[in-house]
Image: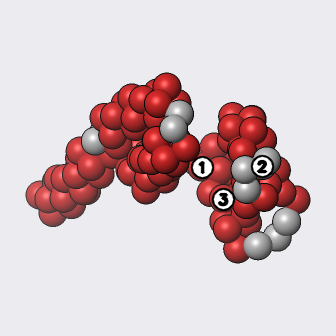
Amino acid sequence: QLQGLLSHDNIGISPKFAHAHKMFWIDGWLPIAARSFFDDGITGANAIEFDLLVPFAFETAFTNLQFVAYAAMAQGAGDIVFSTATSSIQTDEARHSQIGHPVLKTMVDLEKISKELEKKI
């Protein structure tokens, strides 16, 4: 909803912003990948998969890049308030993305420990 709302005001500036409205009804590779990502991540994941997916993949690869771009676009359009708000959100997303790497390391370490214990048994 937020992406549709933000892009709606900018359609008058450039018709390129209509992609936010069209994305859910077209079958390009990006919309299909996005729908699959969220469907698998939210409804098909167990707790461990979700814990790895959200901070490691989603926060690092998607939201950080998106909010940096939003801040830059708003700055270029002269909207200082929105630029500052999205920059603040991006710093919060950057903190969230730092959770994924330790979780992944812990999972790898636990796998090594369990294999060592199996050998001893």
Task: Report how many numbered discs are placed on residues in the image.
Answer: 3
Instruction: Tell me which amino acid carries mark 3.
Output: Ala
**Element type at mark 3:** helix
Instruction: Tell me which amino acid carries mark 2.
Output: Ile
Question: What is the CA distance from the residue labelled 2 to the residue labelled 3?
Answer: 22 Å
Q: Residue at x 73, y 66 (%)?
A: 32
Which numbered disc flags the more N-terminal residue, 2 or 3? 2
Quickly name the residue at label 1. 41
Q: Residue at x 27, y 49 (%)?
A: 101
- How dense is the environment of label 1, judged by Cα within 10 Å: few (below 14), some, or many (20 and up)? some
Instruction: Choose top left, top right, bottom left or bottom right for residue 26.
Output: bottom right
Question: What is the CA distance from the residue labelled 1 to the residue labelled 2?
Answer: 31 Å
- Residue 27 in the image: x percent, y percent? 82, 70
Observer-nearest of 4 and 32: 4
Q: Is residue 86 visible?
A: no
Q: Which mark is residue 34?
A: 3
Q: Residue furthest right?
A: 25
Which circle, 1 or 2, is nearer the viewer?
2
Q: Is residue 95 visible?
A: yes
- Residue 48 in the image: x percent, y percent? 44, 44
Which circle, 3 or 1, is nearer the viewer?
3
Quickly name the residue at label 2. 11
Q: Residue at x 40, y 35 (%)?
A: 87
Looking at the figure, which quarter contains the N terminus?
Answer: top right
Which numbered disc flags the more N-terminal residue, 1 or 2? 2
**Element type at mark 2:** loop
Question: What is the CA distance from the residue labelled 3 to the residue labelled 1?
Answer: 10 Å
Vertical order, 38 against 88 (above or below): below
Which circle, 2 or 3, is nearer the viewer?
2
Vertical order, 88 against 58 (above or below): above
Observer-nearest of 38 and 71: 71
Looking at the figure, which quarter contains the C terminus?
Answer: bottom left
